[in-house]
Amino acid sequence: MNAPDGTPTNAVFGFISMFLKFYEDARPDAVICAFDAGRPEFRMKALTQYKAQRPPMDDALRVQFPVIESLLDAMNVPVVKVKGREGDDILGTISARDEELGYQTLLVTGDKDAYQLVTDLTHVVTTKRGITDVTIYGPEQMEERYGVTPAQFPDFLGLKGDSSDNIPGVPGIGDKSAAKLLQNFGSIDGIYENLDKLKGKQLQNLQEKKLVLNQKGDCAGL
């Protein structure tokens, strides 16, 4: 799909179609779009391999972002970008402000890091397939799906790993074992305060990964 001048427009079409669908369904009082702006240096300093596995953005996609921003501007939709920050960092700031004001907020994002922002007032909308198959995560859905609270989610990712951000996790720890550790001890700090209650390979791997886990928590937090 291309414009008459040859500019690719498939991402423009997909984004705007999804935006209009969500807007029609949610009927929000206000809407803001947040985009990444440069490399998140503070995360890359905390964990040098952060997102290192991702190839550079394809030029055919890159040239469509200005078009998307122009269309949003034409619809009077504010676009927010902060140098050195990711879009979800901005969502975190907005949702924290909305919490203070007592507003209900829907965060539409494909990044699981945003799940830590879930509260009774703030829910995360994640697309599963296309623009109609979505899941809305509130506190209950977080507990049901992952077995942890939203506040525990950065530690959950640190323990089990997150391939999308190139966070490797602790060997031998997956979703279920990460959730169980956090259910029993509350946090990564709580786990290390209770290492005497663990044993075997899990204990050994956690002892070897202590410093790296602290770095991973810094990367996953918003």
Image (cartoon, rainbow, N blue to C red):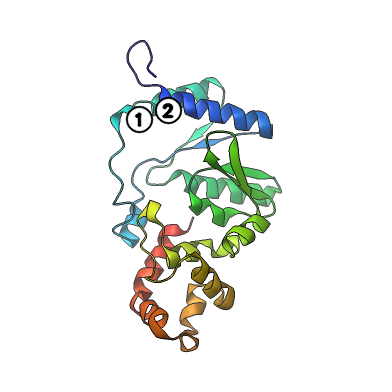
Displayed quadrant of residue 45? bottom left
Vertical position of residue 55 compared to residue 151: above or below:
above
Q: Name the residue beneath numbered marker 2.
A: 11
Q: SS of the residue at dot 1?
A: helix
Vertical position of residue 97 compared to residue 3: above or below:
below
Displayed quadrant of residue 208? bottom left
Q: Position of residue 207 (x, y in %)?
A: 37, 80
Q: Is residue 9 left or right of residue 26?
A: left
The extreme top residue here reads 4
The extreme right residue here reads 102
Q: Name the residue beneath numbered marker 1.
A: 61
Please tell me which residue is depicted at 28% across the width and 40% down the height of the picture. 56
Vertical position of residue 138 compared to residue 192: above or below:
above
Q: CA distance from mark 2 to mark 1?
A: 7 Å
Mark 1: amino acid: Leu
Q: Position of residue 152 (x, y in %)?
A: 55, 65
Q: Residues within 10 Å of mark 2 (few under 14, many from 20)?
A: some
Mark 2: amino acid: Ala
The mark that comes first in sequence, 2 or 1, is 2
Which residue is at the front of the view, 113 or 10? 10
Q: Residues within 10 Å of mark 1 (few under 14, many from 20)?
A: some
Q: Is residue 9 left or right of residue 112?
A: left
Q: Is residue 153 visible?
A: yes
Q: Position of residue 91 (x, y in %)?
A: 53, 45
**Residue 163: image tag:** none
Q: SS of the residue at dot 2?
A: helix
Which residue is at the front of the view, 82 or 203? 203
**Decide: marks 2, 1 in contact (CB < 8 A)?**
yes
